[in-house]
């Protein structure tokens, strides 16, 4: 379980961080190397979820989506300095519950 969570977090940070670097390059006129580095990190993001041990691609990516939402709220708060409100936290908690159900519910 710990490995699954770690891989989701690493994938989320790679997706958000890589996308953020591309954003800075295109939207804030940062040097080209920001865009190239961000793109390489996004390739890593594409690889990380495949290291999960869950047998279903759809289930892994659906669960990852919930983790991504939580990480995006935290990124906005810590990097963009936009404080999440109560509804952001409630939504993130609902996503976390959904991810937990999808991944660890007993199945036949």
Image (spheres, rainbow, N blue to C red):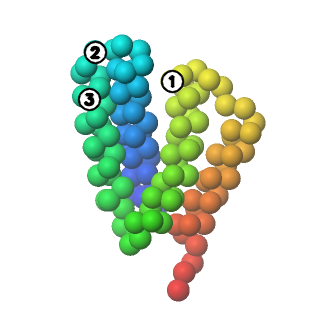
In this picture, residue 66 sits left or right of residue 7: right
Please tell me whether mark 1 sits on a helix, a strand or a loop.
Answer: loop
26 or 63, which is in the foreground?
Answer: 26
Residue 100, compared with residue 10, is above or below; it is below
Q: Residue under label 2, please give it.
A: 31
Please tell me whether mark 3 sits on a helix, a strand or a loop.
Answer: helix
Residue 66 showing in the rendered view? yes
Q: Position of residue 90 (x, y in %)?
A: 72, 45
Q: Position of residue 84 (x, y in %)?
A: 67, 31
Q: Residue under label 1, please give it.
A: 79
Q: Residue under label 3, please give it.
A: 37
Mark 3 or mark 1: name the one nearer the start of the chain.
3
Task: Give the mark toward the camera: 1 or 2.
Answer: 2
Q: Position of residue 6 (x, y in %)?
A: 41, 51
Residue furthest right as drawn: 86
Mark pair 1, 2: CA separation: 19 Å
Q: Quadrant of residue 74?
A: top right
Crowd tier of the residue under label 3, counting other residues whose Cα lies within 10 Å: few below 14, some 14–19, many 20 or above: some
Q: Position of residue 58 (x, y in %)?
A: 45, 65
């Amino acid at each position: 379980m710990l490995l699954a969570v770690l891989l989701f977090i690493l994938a989320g940070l790679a997706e958000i961080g890589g996308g953020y670097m591309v954003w800075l390059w295109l939207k804030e006129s940062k040097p080209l190397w920001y865009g190239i580095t961000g793109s390489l990190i996004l390739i890593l993001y594409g690889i990380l979820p495949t290291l999960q041990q869950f047998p279903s691609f759809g289930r892994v990516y659906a669960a990852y989506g919930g983790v991504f939402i939580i990480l995006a709220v935290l990124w906005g708060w810590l990097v963009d300095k936009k404080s999440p409100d109560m509804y952001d936290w409630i939504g993130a908690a609902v996503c976390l519950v959904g991810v937990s159900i999808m991944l660890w519910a007993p199945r036949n």
